[in-house]
Amino acid sequence: MVTGMEFNSNNTLKRDLEKYAAQYAIEQERQGSLGDGRSSIHYPALFLFVGDLVAPAVSAVQEINRLKWDNGDGVVYVQIGTEDQEAGSGETRTGGSSDDGQVTRHCLPLFAGQTERPSKTRRKDVHRSFHESDQALFDLNRTLRRVSNRIAEYGRLYSSFDRIYVTVVTRADDPLNVLLPELTKLTEIILSQAFKSVQTDLHVLVSEMEQVDSFGYASAAGLAFLRELDYMQSLDYTFSGNLLVTEDGISIPVTHHASPLYDLVYLLSDKNERGTGVPGGWIENAEIICRICLLKNRKQDANHSGSVSSTGANTYNNTSFKNNIRTTSDQHGYASAGFAEIRRPNKPIALAVLYHMYRYLLARMRQEPDWSIKDKLAFFGLDAASVERKVEGLLPSEDLVSGMSGIMTHNVSFSDLKPLSLREAERALFGQGAEAYFRDNVVRLVEERVRERSSTGSLRRQAEQSRAEHPEVGYFQWAAWSDGEPGSVREALLGLIRDKSMQLESARALLEQRQQERVEDQSFKRTLFRDKQNVRNLIDCMLERVYVPKVDLLRLENELHLLRIYDTEMEELHRYSRHVTAALEALERTLRETAAQSIAAADEYIGQNVMEYYGKVTEELITDLEAKRGRDVWFEDRYMGDMNRLATEGDDRLLKRLMEVCHSLLLTAEPLRLPFEEELLQRANVTIAYGDKDVLTRDDLFRRLYHTLEDQAVVRVRVFDYTQEHRYEEKYFFGDHHSAFMDYAAHAEETSRIYKLGVVYEERSSGVEKLNLMGGFHLEDLMVYRNGKVYYDSYTENGYELHPAGLAEKLSPIR
């Protein structure tokens, strides 16, 4: 049964393991030991997130760009919302901005004090409130100018500062997107004062899976925005407004001449073209957004300029793509995309290697030394010689028995003593004096010494001292030797206790027998006519025949007492050592479970045989390392050190050291630096016997990878295929120019494909990615558009005003 404390501890360990695995994966992406070269963007980039609903996407996009772009730290992000992301629970800030390095969050004071449930005129009110608030517009101007200056500070990271790419991201059902024309044009006009050209794309995130509690209004508001978007993207769209504000409050008009507001508009849903949900929801589209931005703004390597390389790979051409998705009636076409990646499963690998390394170290800790039971007893100080020394130390060293001859006796004649037993004669001579003397000068002294030495933990202290000389004997051996099973030290100790008990009973019987012997039967020297001398000789005989056995009896009693103390302490030692070993075994289970969960979370095909393959890899690395540096390299102080001591300091300390050692000794080794295709091929065949006809060939692997990528890169938007007359597709691979798979992919289906295929080369060996672009559809082709019409019409009929004042008349009719 797992206690609450153990459960919490286990959760903490798993979090630490996840951080460790994630860090390893980041290292592999950022070159690390693999030499992966990340792409760079050519021109500066700004990501503008509009609305509160897209706030979670900011960190997702930022992290992807940091990871995959060499100059990702120079990208600037702005999120404009109405809720202060920095405010604590229950707090609402009415306006202003917060700056966190690359990320600027600006809060428009539009919804202060309003209720949670949207009003019937919420989108209209947002538009009106923005235009009526001079302060809101002034604060926004100031924030965007500060952002423009921030971008200039990163100038050294870019090849050219002539152009800037602006990527606008919003949710279709977010009320703040009613201000997209104002926010977009103000951003462009401020940036145009620093750049010769500003190119702006819009990514609209559509959430179909999450609409449970507010599906009606969200669908209606989403369709209202899509209608406005169609208007913004028309060829004759114009816009004018007093958006620029100086520090003196002077407003300057901003004008957009007849043309689509955005260069390209991408619609990305949390359902794909097949109608199935996307794992991770709409936030997973962050990868697509980042990859599209890279495709359009990638710094070209002189060695791989890519026009048409030896693989026949074509680079992306934005003008060509726009022209191909425009319809014959010159109506603007929309685009969408799908993304898939296959890479070495770095997180599962890190966890699998860690598990197998720990499993090996635990096996080493469990190894029994080739010791006899006598050696094991001596380890705990329980061998005969050690026990005898301890018992001898308890008994008085001086000859107290002979000293008893001086005890004062009663005046009794020898003739009166002759018919008595030795016990009766002792009482006749000494009364209680002899027994009292023996008790006070021998028994009590021994009892005091026993009390002094019987402090708890003496057996454990002895074991700790012995372990200093024999570090190979740790808690696993302690637990095994103290469990009382056949062959254990405790079984031998219990055997000693039984033997001593029998000896004690025999000694007691012998003493009783002697005390019953008659005086006249004793063989001591008798002298005629010397009564006192005969009494003296009887006393000497009595001391020899009774009190010497009493001393031996006392020795046996205390030896047995000492052994029983040791038995009690051995029970405690077993509980303690078993507690430690149980924690070590529990950590092994946690490592295995965490690795298994990480593998299960990976793609079924890409994550196959991770445990089996990396079990063999780890075993080979360990063998090679020990051959070079000695079998005890793991237990050097700079690596694991004394694992038994670490085990008593807590799982977190042990795990931390374990992760450090695994990283330094194993994860950086050459066998973990194979190109991902070679690694996957070897891993796929690790369970196949030599000569087996089912062995996976390189061509088989490439074919599977190719189809897996295509299958997973399904376009993330639902359209009616039969109404989509102008479908146009381009597909791009991102991967290593040395990769054999990239060469295969570039030429696969080249005689039958009806789409443009391109390859983006990166100095990477850890995986390959695929981005499928699809365009040419219209908004009425979307399932979300068709499904939203009924809600839009119903909400409009019920008095909801879903557009700014005067705009509804300009919109095209719902198709």
Image (tube, grey):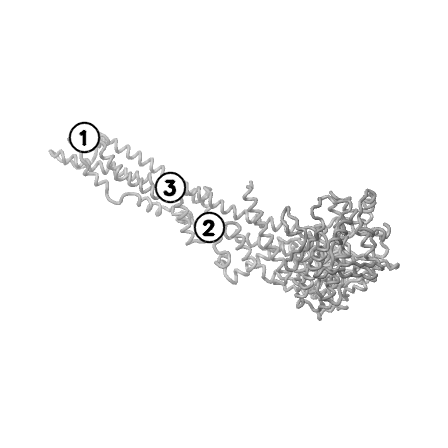
Measure the C-alpha gap from mark 3 to mark 2: 23 Å
Q: Residues within 10 Å of mark 1 (few under 14, many from 20)?
A: some
- Sooner in the amino-acid sequence: mark 3 or mark 1: 1
The disc at residue 474 is 2
Q: Which residue is mark 1?
A: 418
State the image coordinates of residue 213 (x, y, percent, origin top left).
Answer: 73, 42
State the image coordinates of residue 456 (x, y, percent, origin top left).
Answer: 39, 43
Give the residue at the far bottom of this rendering.
302
**What's under tag 3, amino acid-wise?**
Leu
Q: Which residue is mark 3?
A: 563
**What's under tag 2, amino acid-wise?**
Gly
**Residue at image coords 50%, 60%:** 630
User: How many marks on residues?
Assistant: 3
* Residue 430 in view (yes/no): yes
**What's under tag 1, amino acid-wise?**
Lys
State the image coordinates of residue 32 (x, y, percent, origin top left).
Answer: 61, 62
Which mark is in front, 3 or 1?
A: 3
Question: Do callouts 1 and 2 mark residues in contact (Cβ within 8 Å)?
Answer: no
